Amino acid sequence: MPQNDKTADATCVFRVPSSDVTVPDLMANVRITAPVLSIVKGPQTGAAFELEDDVTTIGRDPANGIFLNDMTVSRSHARIIREGLGARIEDLGSLNGTWVDGAIVNAAPLHDGSSVQIGTFTLIYHESTPERIETGE
């Protein structure tokens, strides 16, 4: 290209229409029947746990309902208690604390989309089928 052509340095962004995407939307037909806690950051990113029981324990001990294998997590770190249509999380005296939506808590209600941080893990609480978020124009 000629050096005086200003388009030579331009950045072009190409967006593939969703109808042309070759990777299938694996979550399109998933229906959540129980609330789900999904790991979005940490050693087990991508793991998801259905909260089918009334009480689900979280910790580094493999006996927990949600086993988070990392030294930043206490053996018995927290528990989630389902109450009717909602849920709440309680810290069980952990060393590093339990954080919900950026605040350290002893106990807190969980809402669809709540962020839970336990040690190096960040988890998202879902009560309904996640919506696909389109980016771009």
Image: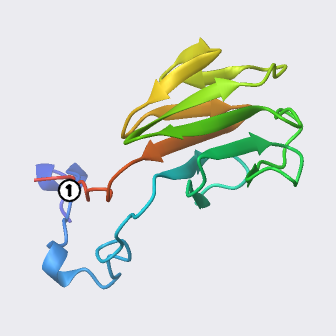
Residue 24 is situated, as x and y percent measured from the top left of the image, at 33, 82
Q: Is residue 122 left or right of residue 64?
A: left
Say which element carries label 1.
loop
- Judging depth in this view, the residue of 92 and 115 nearest the camera is 92
Asked if 62 appears above or below 120 in the picture, the reply is: below
Q: Residue at x 60, y 54 (%)?
A: 53
Of the 4 image quadrants, the one containing the N terminus is bottom left
User: What residue is shown at x 20% (from left), y 56% (from top)?
Assistant: 134
> Against 64, is 93 above or below?
above
Q: Is residue 72 left or right of residue 16?
A: right
Q: Quick check: can you spot residue 136?
A: yes
Q: Residue at x 62, y 31 (%)?
A: 117
Residue highlighted by disc 1:
134
Mark 1: few/some/many CA within 10 Å (<14, 14-19, 20+): few
Compared with 45, 59 (above or below) is: above
Amino acid type at mark 1: Glu
Closer to the camera in the image, 17 or 120? 120
